[in-house]
Amino acid sequence: MALCIFCLLLTLLFMQTMADTSCSTDCFVQSRAAYYPNSEVNGTDVGACGFGSFGATINGGDVSAASDLYRNGVGCGACYQVRCTNSAYCSSNGVTVVITDQGSGDNTDFILSKRAFGGMAQTPDKATSLLALGVTDIEYRRVSCSYPNKNITVKIVESSSNPHFLAFVIWFQQGKRDITAVQLCESENFVCKLLDRSHGAVWTSTSPPNGPLSLRMLFSDEEGQETWVVPVNDIPQDWIAGETYDSGVQVDQ
């Protein structure tokens, strides 16, 4: 009898452990959200992630600033399903937003674009009522980013100067993993240099390597698994500030 009880306890403990593991990435977290009060419908083009105007319009303008989830810039480009909990106004699906900025207010984890905040509502009329609240209780979870027919793209920041200084941001970060490190390599001999995260999603190199340049991006998940991804396409030797370069790869997990 005692052995049966012991086995039952072990089974229950295992089931609870499995449930906790599943919840660590898929369960909703309770919080609050506000929206940019002085913004246009889309997000801001001066967000802390350094995406510029791209950060205001990516994902159709369903974007957000984050407080703790910003994670010193590591959280830039991450996607979250956010849904408000007021059954009088809110839909069950909510909205999927991309983190493009840092900010907080009134105990919030998210400051959504006006479009995204209203997008949590059931109807346009109820969106107006929801926006009138200014701040609302929500629940959120991390989800995969999806950009159909888009490869990861490198945007050279306008302050760059070939060949003395290179700064860039990474657009269309797919999947559910973070980019935690970036190396810049000479394509011919593959000598690599670990880059600095200047701020947000901006990576920089003083005196970058010569010739065509190959990137190596380290993708990390919440369980500590890490994978280096090497794009198919190089950044050309004659790269130009302000230009974008298609990496030729997608990372969907």
Image: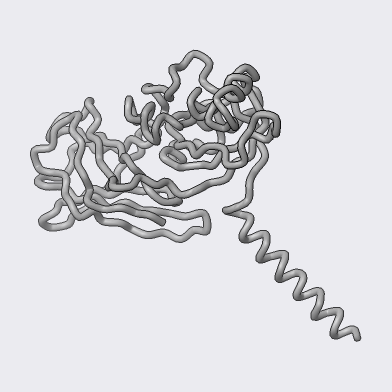
The answer to whether 89 appears left or right of 246 in the picture is: right
Q: Position of residue 181 (x, y in %)?
A: 36, 48
Q: Position of residue 199 (x, y in %)?
A: 38, 32
Q: Nearer the viewer, residue 7 or 33?
A: 33
Q: Which residue occupies 20% across, 36% down? A: 244
15 lies above or below 37: below
Q: Nearer the viewer, residue 13 or 58?
A: 58
29 lies above or below 65: below
The answer to whether 86 appears left or right of 240 in the picture is: right
2 lies above or below 83: below
Q: Nearer the viewer, residue 77 or 138?
A: 138
Q: Position of residue 113 (x, y in %)?
A: 48, 25
The answer to whether 28 appears left or right of 187 in the picture is: right
The answer to whether 58 appears left or right of 20 in the picture is: left
Q: Position of residue 59 (x, y in %)?
A: 40, 36
Q: Which residue occupies 50% across, 29% down? A: 116
Q: From this viewpoint, which residue is outermost toward the top?
A: 38
In the rendered image, the quadrant that contains the N terminus is: bottom right
Q: Nearer the viewer, residue 91 or 82?
A: 91
Q: Quadrant of residue 108?
A: top right
Q: Quadrant of residue 207?
A: top left
Q: Which residue occupies 26% across, 53% down? A: 249
Q: Which residue occupies 14% across, 53% down? A: 187
50 lies above or below 9: above
Colouring of the image: one colour
